[in-house]
Amino acid sequence: MTSRRNFLTGAAIVGATAVGRSALAAVPDIATAPLPTANTAVPLHPKDGQPYQPVVTLNGWTLPWRMKNGWKEFHLVAEPVQRELAPGMTAQLWGYNGSSPGPTIEVVEGDKVRLFVTNKLPEHTAVHWHGQRLPSGMDGVGGLTQPQIQPGKTFVYEFEARRSGTFMYHPHADEMTQMAMGMMGLWITHPRDPKRTPGYAPVDRDFCFLLNAFDIEPGSATPKIMTMLDFNLWCWNSRVFPGIDSLAVRLGDRVRIRVGNLTMTNHPIHMHGHEFVVAGTDGGWTNPASRWPEVTADVAVGQMRAVEFTATEPGDWAFHCHKSHHTMNAMGHDVPTMIGVDQTEFAKKIGRLVPDYMAMGDKGMADMGAMEMPLPDNTLPMMTGQGPMGALEMGGMFTTIKVREGLGRDDYKDPGWYKHPPGTVAYEWNGQLQNTERAPTSRTDGSETTQPAGAPTWRARKPQGGHSH
Ligand SMILES: [Cu+2]
């Protein structure tokens, strides 16, 4: 983290001299992602214009701008990028300014925004500004509202940021390819007058990220773009656990998390330890009277949900998609269910033909988390990530919200694992166990029985070879 801060300080000095040069230029400088590109950058506080609390883009960064004659000018470059999805796997993607997703764009309601878009892809593109009110011709639908931006060309978009809220940008040209390759980004419009913006309330920490998915065959690096549903890498901002940074939150902070979905399926985003309300969508801030408490918010395809809560509970709280397949990864879906199948004899026979053969999954898939299996290069195992209590058995849309006392205002670095107060951790029972009693089952005639008629008897094979009923 220290090295990243040093780097950012260095970048700011370089940037200051570069701005002097580019102030004379017609097109703003091209900012590229700070290195390492997959780290969460410190929030970019506005150096001019209206003040606001900047967002923190999870494993991402905010695009610097320049002011020119009353316009806030940005320069996006659509280009091939390399993205580390998690340690051990780097993908060949398409993105903007050196990263996928592209940098977050932050403006203030009422800003006049000018965006230069340069196409360095091998095919045409166009950028759609999802959710914005703008002139139809600035909406970025290639072929409908503008000609496509051909390779090597630069287009200019100009519009006023009319409404505060959370938006997205993505190509509206060969979307299937370009979004499957990772082209997307977030756009935040901060309110000009926070006190007079219905439904809006300031927060201490304001996080944002996009849900995206890739289908990359084990051992390769380029997504398969024809995949419609059967993706094998479920990402937040093109990262999978344990590559997704934790969200560091100070105890007592009011927190907003903005989540946009540009995958091909919905994701019920679930938070442990706290309740939240959906305070905003890509349509705007919700009416406070319309809100109800939730611990899971379903984010449908092409939707954004801004959830808000007060971090009152110290600890390491899991925060993840509730579709269990989306918190795991790779391996594909072709693995048969082997639970309860005794593979001993089968494995012996196969072992004669294939010496490295391993029987797996007969007690569930949890063994896989601790097992180091040989994998092709540039492949993520199905479940990795070590927690303080053992293997975490997660590998996709999963991270933790780390609520701690006394964090600094702009301190987002990982505070390490939570130190539980004595007597607050689930523990093993070492006393006597009573015989299990079956609850009585009602019959339709009103009489009761302790055993349903014709109930089957189960024989489960225990790991140590013992038997029980
Ligand atoms: Cu999901």
Image (cartoon, grey):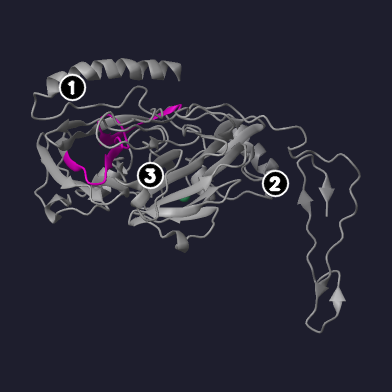
Q: Are marks 2 and 3 in contact (CB under 8 Å)?
A: no
Q: Position of residue 309 (x, y in %)?
A: 52, 47
- At x 86%, y 69%, the residue is 450
The answer to whether residue 105 is magenta is yes
Amino acid type of the residue that numbered disc 2 sits on in the rendered structure: Asp
Q: Position of residue 48 (x, y in %)?
A: 25, 31
> Which of the marked residues, 3 or 1, is nearer the chain's N terminus?
1
The boundaries of the magenta stretch are: 87-114
Using residue 446 as the reference point, say whether residue 105 is left or right of it.
Answer: left
Amino acid type of the residue that numbered disc 1 sits on in the rendered structure: Val
Residue 19: mark in rendering? 1
Mark 2 residue crowding within 10 angstroms, few (<14) / some (14–19) / many (20+): few
Amino acid type of the residue that numbered disc 3 sits on in the rendered structure: Asn
| Mark 2 or 3, closer to the camera | 3
Q: Which residue is mark 2?
A: 342
Mark 3 residue crowding within 10 angstroms, few (<14) / some (14–19) / many (20+): many
Residue 120 is at least partly visible in this image = yes
Where 211 falls versus 143 (above or below)? Answer: above
> Which of the marked residues, 2 or 3, is nearer the chain's N terminus?
3
Q: Is ligand 1 closer than 8 angstroms to the Cβ of mark 1?
A: no
Q: Quadrant of residue 81?
A: top left
Count the numbered circles shown: 3
